Amino acid sequence: MTITDITHKLESGGRIDAAEAKLLWEKAPLWLLARLATEAKQRQSGDKVFYNKNFHLEPTNICLFECRFCSYRRRKGEAEAWDYSMEEVLEQVASRRESGATEVHIVGGVHPERDIHYYVEMIRRIKQMWPTICVKAFTAVELHYMIRKAGLSVEEGLRLLKEAGMESIPGGGAEIFDEKIRAEICPGKCSSAEWLEMHEVAHKMGFDSNATMLYGHIESIDHRIDHLMRLRDLQDRTGGFNAFIPLKFRSANNGLEQLGETSVVDDMRTLAMSRLILDNVPHIKAYWVMYGKESAEMALSFGADDIDGTIEDSTKIYSMAGAADERPRLTIAEIEKMCQAAGYRAIERDTHYNEL
């Protein structure tokens, strides 16, 4: 099997296996990956690039886990720790009601003292205040802990959240699925099998979700391919993933700082290969808060067809790890300009990718 053979296979709509993906990832010229990924993107979404009007809600950064890559988590009482009360959370939501947002994205630390009933009440009260807002909330890692702490099954916990008004699940916490890597970088966190099970059960219950991969630390290309293949297998079974988001490891202020960061070339290869391997996931997202605006624009030429949303200076996860935008905010005009520069049309969507 040669690169030319794999190219022809992809151009005719074929699916590549792990060995073909590895050859392409490591040996194909960057221009070829850009072309193949762009063709795959255009088959999925034509000349459209999607965004939404959203804001993040991060109720706490107090977390019981000690992930080595994380610049965000704090212990209770430490400097830069926050733990908003229910009333403070609701005040933050109320302050955004005139923003035109269609989605609130809720993630944060895994608070050791809170179970699912606290967060069910939070969602219920947000929906009472703002019935039309879509609640996309809690990584599989957060869900696993809060549901288990309450002594419930995955199905029982997700049912409570759905009844309260939650509609979608973000993709965080996947990191790298290889368990040896997880033991090194995020010991104690739910296993890859538990992460995948959470999303599989959620899909079967009518939730849609996203998926992520944290790359650029101690993993290899083989680990990245294995991760993507496991996501592809789950998507074959459920069809519940809306989008895949490759997350670049940012090295400031964490336990893996000595590793530095991957190059922009590696970022673009990773985006392109994600598009080519995940032939059954509709959208590939270039999360501009993590990449920076210039790289996110470049990503639109490497298979990405979504850049997330306006954010409105509402997340600290990447700024605390050294991302360029300390106060991340993107206007609609900026989004449209980025898309036009790459030759695409900016399309506003809701959480479920309905065009608005």
Image (cartoon, grey):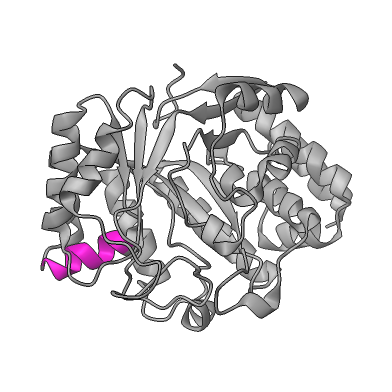
Between 350 and 196, the residue placed more toward the observer is 350
Query: Picture coordinates of residue 10 (x, y %)?
Result: 74, 41
Q: Is residue 340 left or right of residue 151?
A: right
Prevalent SS, magenta region: helix
Count of all numbered marks drawn on residues in the image: 0
Between 225 and 347, the residue placed more toward the observer is 347
Q: Residue at x 60, y 78 (%)?
A: 256
Q: Is residue 97 above or below residue 239?
A: above
Q: Is residue 77 above or below residue 115?
A: below
Q: Toward which corner of the image does residue 238 lie, by quadrant? A: top left
Q: Is residue 296 left or right of residue 232?
A: right
Query: Picture coordinates of residue 33 (x, y %)?
Result: 80, 45
Q: Residue at x 17, y 70 (%)?
A: 113
Query: Picture coordinates of residue 310 (x, y %)?
Result: 50, 33
Q: Quadrant of the N terminus?
A: bottom right
Query: Picture coordinates of residue 48 (x, y %)?
Result: 62, 22
Q: Is residue 342 magenta?
A: no
Part of the protein shown in magenta:
142-150
Q: Is residue 102 left or right of residue 221?
A: left
Q: Is residue 343 visible?
A: no
Q: Toward which corner of the image does residue 342 lie, by quadrant? A: top right
Q: Is residue 132 above or below residue 107?
A: above
Q: Is residue 354 visible?
A: yes
| Outermost residue to the front | 79
Q: Residue at x 16, y 63 (%)?
A: 115
Q: Residue at x 61, y 29 (%)?
A: 44
Q: Quadrant of the C terminus?
A: top left
